[in-house]
Amino acid sequence: MNSSRPGLIERYRDRLPFEPGDPVVSMGEGSTPLVRADHVSELAGCEVWLKLEGLNPTGSFKDRGMTCAVSAAVREGAQAVICASTGNTAASAAAYAARAGLTGAVIVPEGKIATGKLAQALMHGARVIALRGNFDQALELVRELCGRHPIALVNSVNDFRLEGQKTAAFEVLEDLGGEVDAVCLPVGNAGNITAYWKGFVEAGAAPAMYGFQAEGAAPLVTGRRVDKPETVASAIRIGNPARWEEAMAAMRDSRGAVNAVSDEQILDAYRMLASREGVFCEPASATSVAGLLHHRAGGARRVVCVLSGHGLKDPQTALEQAGSVVPCEATIEAVERAVLG
Ligand code: F0G
């Protein structure tokens, strides 16, 4: 065992491409809470559950894919792993590489990733490369690099990533006794929605998959690549998703849909989740709830919204969106005024 809580390779080995005795790099990822959201349910007119993927070891769902991608890389004898990233994949790859004793390198769009994610990648000792370009360019370059050098690519173009991420669908089914009508997800590079659908299909379930993108970065909605994607939800600032076709197939085959929400709608949902549900997620994650509230999920009665990353990843956006602190002198009268209004 790699941690006191079984990680997902251990938990779902019979449904993953790992044999007993294979190396496992794990930090007890997966088994994240699924919590009922009463306020969101009321607003949406259906029963809504939130899958808190920010409670994975590095604070995002990427750890599900990374335990598999890095374990497979170790099995193949890799010395180094690399990824392009809007931040969370970088943090996760850096952590799992550190744990495995591998060299980690991450290429991120310069100045465009949230502070917490940058701090994580640096703390874990990865080589952090700030590209003067966007995520799509970073991914293109990193793929070319891996064609020239023996470095394991751990973006979601790596099938092991999807294998790991599909386990979230198993957990949803287990927690809800198989009864779920629709699943809402934020969509960036389109790996996660592809992975969820794979998991549901393997488990014999077929909830409708609803993908939501930010208006300024919505290639799946418009059907056209976006050369200069823009959105406050930096994690999904992506104009040419690698899993484009598969994600569209997942939404079509499950009778779901893909839609866009504005930055304002994303931030409204972001603040509402924190202030009304007690759940602090990052802006990209709130896209799933914003999408449900503005586009609905067909006639679904029970819906799961995936909150893909923790709010602490992006303290800057939080402080910009939140109320201000109350300054106070150190006397009881001043404290009374400050506390009681
Ligand atoms: N939510 C968060 C918090 C993310 O970090 C990402 C993707 C997504 C949703 C979208 O998932 O790409 O599988 O459609 N982040 C990647 C990264 C691109 O580099 O961290 P997807």
Image (cartoon, grey):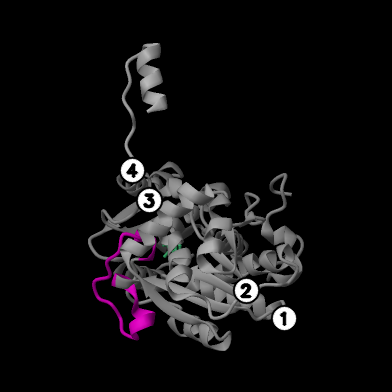
Relative image position of residue 300 (x, y in whole percent) = 59, 77
- Residue closest to the eye, 4 or 39: 39
Q: Earlier in the sequence, mark 3 or mark 4?
A: 3
- Residue 182 shown in magenta: no
Q: Which residue is mark 3?
A: 127
Relative image position of residue 108 (x, y in whole percent) = 33, 58
Q: Are marks 1 and 3 in contact (CB under 8 Å)?
A: no
Q: Judge the density around disc 1: few (<14), some (14-19), many (≥20) Cα neighbours within 10 Å.
A: few
Q: Residue at x 62, y 55 (%)?
A: 35
Relative image position of residue 126 (x, y in whole percent) = 42, 49
What range is drawn magenta here? 216-236
Q: Earlier in the sequence, mark 2 or mark 3?
A: 3
Q: Nearer the viewer, mark 1 or mark 2?
A: 2
Q: Earlier in the sequence, mark 4 or mark 1?
A: 1
Q: Which residue is mark 1?
A: 204
Q: Earlier in the sequence, mark 1 or mark 3?
A: 3
Q: Image check: 206 left or right of 221?
A: right
Q: Residue at x 62, y 70 (%)?
A: 166
Q: Nearer the viewer, mark 2 or mark 3?
A: 2
Q: Amino acid at mark 3?
A: Arg
Relative image position of residue 182 (x, y in whole percent) = 59, 75
Disc 2 on helix, strand or loop?
Answer: loop
